[in-house]
Image (tube, rainbow, N blue to C red):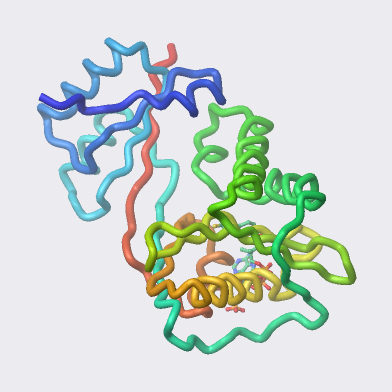
Amino acid sequence: MNAPCEFLNWDSAFFNYRVGRVTCDTLAEPAVEAILRWSADNRIDCLYFLARANDDETVRLAEANGFHLVDIRVTLTARASASASRSDHANGVTIRPHVHEDISVLRAIAATGYGDSRFYYDGHFPRERCNEMYAVWVEKACNDPEQRVLVATVEDRIAGFITCAMLSPDRGRIGLLGVAESFRGQRIGPCLIDSALDYFRSRNVEQVTVVTQGRNIAAQRSYQRAGFVTETIQLWYHKWFLP
Ligand SMILES: CC(C)(COP(=O)(O)OP(=O)(O)OC[C@H]1O[C@@H](n2cnc3c(N)ncnc32)[C@H](O)[C@@H]1OP(=O)(O)O)[C@@H](O)C(=O)NCCC(=O)NCCS
């Protein structure tokens, strides 16, 4: 029988907890038993579980077994080739590919932007580690030759960024989108999304995917105005085994 969970090396090393993840997206009584046994055998501190939102037995068993709901995962998609009505864009915003010298500012924007994510809402992970995780994420994207990071500037000051990756020759993914706090509310996020769609179109991408949080209304509205529609809704649970 396949293991019901997998050990997550990166998360464990980064957060200094033993972190695992349930590999299926529904629960039944026997699966729960196997998951709890695997977690004990592997001395797991925190177990992630990404559940289907439309299976009532899964939700009931997750709640009955101490899984805590930390996020609603919203996946949106857009057809890059469709001519979405473009948002009103901010005046004076320039979008360009990142250069190495941008990285420290992009790290700082990322470190303060994602308080809506499950890592902060979990409550166990130190906030400074969560901040650093997003800083590392944007830095990795900048250093990955397979990804494109677009930067928005206003009067030569970096206002935000968006990361774009190819999943396959005709599918792309937006990874992180972030606007510096002092520049929010000026439609710079929507402008970055449209530029990402232009980039994907130039690569002949058909479909673009992005994941955001159910509680992140600003992000959802920004994507919806650019032509994205909901693809799936899933539930993120975390279960802690610490005493
Ligand atoms: C999401 C984000 C990129 C939006 O960029 P922005 O340039 O500030 O966007 P704007 O505020 O000008 O407009 C975006 C839309 O969100 C709405 N919005 C902005 N803040 C909001 C809030 N706190 N609650 C609800 N809606 C909000 C705006 O009204 C606008 O919607 P509209 O077109 O229907 O009027 C920016 O808020 C941000 O960087 N947030 C932190 C990082 C993040 O959440 N990234 C996305 C996660 S994948």
Q: Residue furthest right?
A: 155
Residue 94 position in % (x across, y down): 77, 74
Across the whole image, how many numbered discs are drawn on residues?
Answer: 0
Q: Is residue 144 left or right of residue 68?
A: right
Q: Is residue 70 left or right of residue 27?
A: right
Q: Is residue 71 above or below residue 88?
A: above
Q: Is residue 22 left or right of residue 77?
A: left
Q: Is residue 157 left or right of residue 211?
A: right
- Residue 15's image quarter? top right
Camera-side residue: 46 or 86? 86
Q: Is residue 170 above or below residue 110?
A: below
Residue shown at 75% from the left, 80% from the top: 90
Residue 119 position in % (x across, y down): 53, 38
Residue 88 position in % (x across, y down): 66, 86
Camera-side residue: 6 or 206? 206
- Residue 160's image quarter? bottom right
Residue 237 position in % (x across, y down): 37, 38
**From this viewpoint, is residue 166 visible?**
yes
Camera-side residue: 54 or 15? 15
Q: Is residue 164 above or below residue 56?
A: below
Q: Quadrant of the N terminus?
A: top left
- Residue 93's image quarter? bottom right
**Ligand 1 positioned in quadrant:** bottom right
Residue shown at 49% from the left, 27% from the top: 10
Residue shown at 16% from the left, 43% from the top: 57
**From this viewpoint, is residue 115 visible?**
no
Residue shown at 49% from the left, 86% from the top: 84
Q: Quadrant of the C terminus?
A: top left
